[in-house]
Image (cartoon, helix red, strand yellow):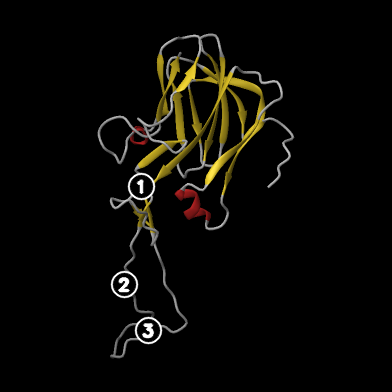
Amino acid sequence: MTLWCVKPGHLCIHAHTMDSKQEMMGLAGMIVSLARQPMTHREYVILLQEWAVQTDGGMDMAGMQMGGQTLPMTQTTGAPSMSEHPTHGEPGTQGRRFDINPMSMDFNYFTLNGKAYPDTAPLRVRRGERVRIRLGNISMDSHPMHLHGHEFQVVAADGSDLMFPWSKNTINVAPGETWDIEFDANNPGVWAFHCHKPHHTTNAHQPGMGGMFTTVTYV
């Protein structure tokens, strides 16, 4: 595969064959086009993903449910079922029961570049550096990513630079979006960088820190 990079930026790449299954099994990534003369001292690329891991380690693909809400189903055929005994009502299609085995979309593992905390890699910086973080969301949830100890500037969206960057400490990355943020490393320490949805910083909804959590660590 050959790509022509016409401008700096980053874009998500993912499967388009059985994409709802393959993306959720990890067949996704990001393409980053770097400037010939980078404007920052250090860059990081972070892919946001989530997983529905069953107790046996597999994924159940038989059906779906989301957020505790089931999907209504209507089954129709060309041959209505008619009652064979006399009735005073109008003829109609007889209801039937269909049992499905749903796949949970209440995801229980949330990862940065395929790793959940404490296995996530720290973002190492040096005092005085200008740092860029490229965020891409290939999951089905939005992720408000929050940086402690610093204010960052939002400088690019979906692979294109913004004419007027703005300052924040939290950026909501919706499904399919990419955002570039930059900050000045001017506050030495170890600072949390994480998704601000509480259950997205757990592993299988267990107590303790996990999931989409890492640190900006001064070296």
User: CB under 8 Å between callouts 2 and 3?
Assistant: no
Label placed on residue 106: 1
Percent position of residue 196, x then y: 40, 29
Between residue 38 and residue 167, name the one nearer to us.
Answer: 38
The kind of secondary structure element at disc 2 is: loop
Nearer the observer: mark 3 or 1; the answer is 1
Percent position of residue 58, x then y: 35, 54
Can residue 159 be seen?
no
Percent position of residue 147, x then y: 45, 21
The amino acid type, in three-letter code, at marker 1 is: Asp
Name which quarter of the figure residue 217 lies in: top left
Task: State the separation of the CA atoms marked 1 and 2.
Answer: 25 Å
The amino acid type, in three-letter code, at marker 2 is: Arg
92 shown above or below 157: below
The kind of secondary structure element at disc 1 is: loop
Task: Answer left or right for 130 relative to 105.
Answer: right
114 shown above or below 83: above
Look at mark 3 in the image and give the residue it sits on: 81
Percent position of residue 28, x then y: 53, 45
Nearer the observer: mark 2 or 3; the answer is 2
Label placed on residue 97: 2
Report the number of numbered marks: 3
